[in-house]
Amino acid sequence: MSIHILGIESSCDDTSAAVISDGFLASNFIANQKVHEIYGGVIPELASRAHQQNIIPVVDTALKMAGLKISDISAVAFTRGPGLLGSLLVGTSFAKGLSIAKNIPMVEINHLQGHVLAHFIKEHNKENILPEFPFLCLLVSGGNTQIIVVRNYFEMEIIGATIDDAAGEAFDKTAKILGLPYPGGPLIDKLATAGNPNAFEFNKPKIQGLDYSFSGFKTSILYFIRDQIAINPNFIEENRADLCASVQRTIVEILMAKVKRAVRETGIKQIALAGGVSANSGLREAFAEFAQKERITAFIPEFKFTTDNAAMIAITGYYKFLQGEFASLDMVPLARMSF
Ligand code: KG4
């Protein structure tokens, strides 16, 4: 009998549902929330209200896309945390309701583990080359920047992490300084294609070991722009593409320096990228180039798995289901959650 896992993701501002059938992607549907754009960031209360509106049609669509009925589902996997509490509550409560009404077991998922295990989603009519254990994963998103040793599906060790801002925040906050709307990361990426990455030099952090820091970098850009505008009020407009390209090059160099060091120190020969910032073209290119040069294997996610999605929750749920790890009804969502 087939195992069909329904995944539900509602940790931030994307409502997503997906079905993984025997480890293969059957559907993955995401409803984005446009309501936050005018505010320049995610408004938690608006996010949870939008999740409430979206969750039933999103789950319904994912089931229809998979050609399944709710009675076919073996278990419902949902994001327990980390994330915005009000948003997490919607997915968690929905999973509990479904579990009680249809007598389906629940599986709780750590969103960050989901990002890492997205590399194990198999798709029909694809080659499906999966990482072998152990591998290193650079997890870069709006809230996290971590280098993780992945020893097994659920045995993960963080060997480096940001001590202040995450890489996604570095992109978004810099974009704001440059007058770009939220989220600025994808826009910096787009504008950078027309710019000179070596036009400007910005401060890089000098942090020990495998940890990261992005707050000094952000401040150096803020002061640089302030000084330049004092000389030429049109500085940003006249140099936008070069500024974006230089910002992107610097963030990518900061990220890659520690990845290189982690490979050297651990001797692990497989590296994977995960999280929203893994959509960045400069980072994807640098990652692939480094792997080719070092003759190691790089796993770069498809764009559809870089952003928050329920397919990664469902695949993680699939492996937990195989281990017989289920959640109880008194389980509560967690805004903060480590591995
Ligand atoms: O993992 P994710 O979808 O969700 C959260 O962590 O909330 O990551 C979102 C982050 C944002 O900071 C966004 O600006 C960044 O990923 N991002 C990018 C790109 N696409 C998304 N940053 C740089 N280049 C991109 N192409």
Image (cartoon, rainbow, N blue to C red):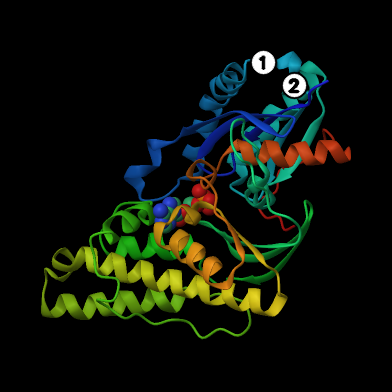
Q: Amino acid at mark 2?
A: Ile
Query: At which x and y percent is residue 101?
Result: 77, 17
Is residue 188 depicted above or below 333 in this figure?
A: below
Q: Which residue is mark 1?
A: 68
Find residue 283 and report its image quarter: bottom left
Is residue 256 depicted above or below 190 in this figure?
A: below
Disc 1 crowd rating (10 Å Cα; few below 14, some 14-19, many 20+) is: some
Disc 1 is placed on an element classified as loop
Disc 2 is placed on an element classified as loop
Q: Is residue 88 visible?
A: yes
Q: Amino acid at mark 1?
A: Leu
Q: Residue furthest right?
A: 324
Is residue 65 depicted above or below 166 in this figure?
A: above
Q: Report the quarter where the C terminus lies.
A: bottom right
**Nearer the N terminus, badge 1 or badge 2?**
1
On whether ligand 1 comes within 8 Å of the CB at mark 2, the answer is no
Query: At which x and y percent is residue 321?
Result: 82, 36
Question: Disc 1 versus disc 2: distance between alpha carbons?
Answer: 8 Å
Instruction: Left or right? Give the position of 178 relative to 288.
Output: left
Query: At which x and y percent is residue 261?
Result: 61, 79
Work out whether residue 329 or residue 183 is closer to the camera in this orientation and state it.
183
| CB within 8 Å, label 1 to label 2 | yes
Query: At which x and y percent is residue 53?
Result: 51, 25
Q: How many marks?
A: 2
Q: Report the quarter where the N terminus lies.
A: top right
Residue ID at (70%, 39%) = 315
Work out whether residue 85 or residue 146 is closer to the camera in this orientation and state it.
146
Q: Which residue is mark 2?
A: 73
Residue ID at (37%, 70%) = 249
Instruction: Left or right? Give the position of 20 relative to 307.
Output: right
